[in-house]
Structure formats: structure tokens, C-alpha cells
Image (spheres, rainbow, N blue to C red):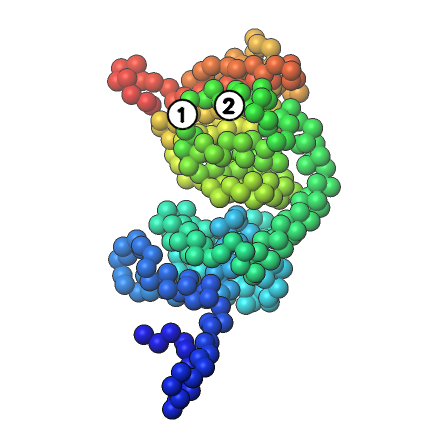
Amino acid sequence: MHDGSVIEPGRIGAKVSVRKPANTTFTNIKKALYLAPMKPQDKLHDSVNTLKAAADPTRLRLLALLAAGEATVGELVEVLDQSQPRVSRHLRILCQGGLADKFRDGQSVYYRLPDDSAARAFVSVLIAQMPADERNLAADATRMAAVRRRRASQAWTDRAVLVESGKAVIPGLAADNDLALAFGELAGDLGDFLDIGVGTGAVLCHLASRAQSATGVDVSPAMRVVARTRVRDAGLVNCTVRKGDMHALPFADHCFDTVLLDQVLSLTQRPRVAIREAARVLRKTGRLVVLDRFGPVKASLSSGHGLGGLAENQLAVMLAEAGLRAGRRRDLAGRLPGFALLTALPAIEINTGTYA
């Protein structure tokens, strides 16, 4: 096999010059493309499209960036210092090859690695071939961090984010924090986890390591920017942050194992609707967790609760209406009066002994 050496003809022992590949990193990547295990496809051209989608230096840089967290087209354009049409074309090829997904958040379009485990494993193989100190990749990571910090700094000027930072959950839960301890008492893994009212992302990041996938939703664009920055800084690749209203969640029925109503029930005048939506997306063997401030027991079971919090007996009735039964309440010391964590499970059919 030719090794790239060039010998001057007609001279024995002539000086040998070696031509090195222009970029050994991407040469090795292209070789790895044909060695990496692939998920069987119904059609051969699907596999070929996946290989072609990855076999480009710019698209490899995009995959490395997306492996660290979801990003907008504008962020990727700024990091790569390429035109928007060119970056969009490369992203479209990655999507067609099954190596990226996209979703809309307001006026922005976000790209991320797909949820498919085989596709993520394939991307991991590619990234493993790249040296950690590769010049382009290291520069991309540095620029992305700067872009994220600037956007987060701008988002922190939003009034809603400032209000969120003063809530009972302190951003960045310490291991000895009473809320962290309460979450630690939740048994088992969280499976596919949904945080409704993700806010600045503190709880999402704290619980993501116990989840197969972790999704946060919030109605505030500024909140979502801050949460995404926190997720990316924490290196959590199983997280995504989406635009979502607790009264009309943008998800199919029964797609989460654990759903957290994260200090939102006491802020809505329609708690029944929010609980019903949370129950809708919860799997039949899942659990609902409510983190909020609970007020005193009320004789009237009307939905009004105000700033004093939702009365626990009110909540129990609303949970029952949604097919759930209230479980253990864990009061959190050192916080606002009535602040607690409460779990609920699908109601059990007495006759069959199965989950309803």
C-alpha cells in the first residue's frame, strides 16, 4: 500500500519526502465512518445518506457542537463564521441523514441530536475519533460558550427571570440543600422526565442525571435561554428545553415517566387544567410530583387559592378528578411557610389491582 512517500526515480537511497494529509483528524473520521456499527435500515440508501451526511468537515463541526447541546441556526452561524444559507444547507443534510432534529421555539429554530440511540451512538463514534485539542473544535467550543454567556446575560435583564431567581428554589441546588434531599428520597430512576415550569433550569439540571431523557418547558423565552445555558454549561446531553404552556402541553399522551409541576400551580387560576394536562402526558405507571406552596385546608373546594398557595385538600380533589391519588407530602424546612414536595400516582382500580 502506498504510504505517501515519494522517491526520486533512478537513484537508490534517494532522500524520501513524505506528504502528510492536510487534516489527519478528518481523514481518520472518514475511515471510521465505514467501521462504525450502524442500525439496520429498511433501505440501503438510508445508510449511504447517513454516511454522506457525516463525511464533511463543516458537518462534523456541527455534530460536535450539537453533541454538547441544542443550538439555534444563528448561534451556529456565529460560531462557524459562515453564511446562514451555507450553515442551513449543512444542517438540512444532517437532518436528511438522520443525524439531527430541529424544532421551533418562537422565532428561532433549534437543532439537536436525534433521540434515536443508534444515531447518537454513531455520532459518539465520530466524536471519539476527534482529538480533544483539535484546533477547529476547540475554537468552536470556546466561541459557543461566549455566545451562550452573552445571550444569558441579556436574558437576565428580563423581569420574569429576575422574579424567578428570587423564588424558593435557589438556583444551583447544593447536595445538602433541603430540596435536594427531598428529591433524593424519590425512589428509582426518573425515566423520561418532564419539568413543567423549568424556569432557570436549576431543578432540571439537578435531576437530569437520574433520567433517561429530561425535558423542560416554560412560557418565558428569557427563561428558556437561561435554562439552556445552564444545561449546556453542565454538559447534560440528555436535556432539551422547549416552549410550552402548562395548560396545553406540546406532547403526545402518555410519553413521560415522571412529571414535575415546578412551582406553577400556585401561579395559575386554572390549576385543574394544568393537573389534567400533566396527567395526560404521564404514563400509566408513572408519577406526578408537585413542588409548590400549600395553603391551609379550606372548607370550600373552589379553584381559587391566591398567593397563600393551593390547599392540600383542594389539590387531592383535583388529582382524583385527573385519575391520580395524592401520596406523601414532604415539607421543606427553612423555606416559605407551606412549601413542600408532594407525589401522586395513578389511581389503583380496587377490583383489578391494576393501575387505572
- Please tell me how many numbered marks the rendered image carries: 2
Q: Earlier in the sequence, mark 2 or mark 1?
A: 2
Q: Mark 2: which secondary structure?
A: helix
Looking at the picture, which amino acid does disc 2 mark?
A: Phe
The residue nearer to you, when weighing 212 against 318, is 212
Q: Position of residue 320 (x, y in %)?
A: 43, 19
Query: Rounded to the nearest whole Å, what is the CA distance between mark 2 and mark 1?
Result: 11 Å
Residue located farthest toward the front when viewing the structure as drawn: 13
Residue at the disc numbered 1: 188
Name which residue lies at 54% across and 34% down. Answer: 204
Label 1: few (<14), some (14–19) or many (≥20) C-alpha neighbours in 10 Å? few
Q: Position of residue 351 (x, y in %)?
A: 27, 15
Name which residue lies at 59% across and 33% down. Answer: 202
Residue located farthest toward the bottom when viewing the structure as drawn: 10
**Tag of residue 56:** none
Name which residue lies at 33% across and 23% down. Answer: 356
Q: Mark 1: which secondary structure?
A: loop
Q: Does the CB distance between marks 2 and 1 fall below 8 Å? A: no
Q: Position of residue 114 (x, y in %)?
A: 43, 50
Quarter that holds the N terminus: bottom left
- Above or below residue 39? Residue 265 is above
Q: Position of residue 267 (x, y in %)?
A: 62, 27
Name which residue lies at 70% across and 44% down. Answer: 153
Residue at the disc numbered 2: 183
| Picture quadrant of residue 257 | top left
Q: Is residue 267 left or right of residue 47?
A: right
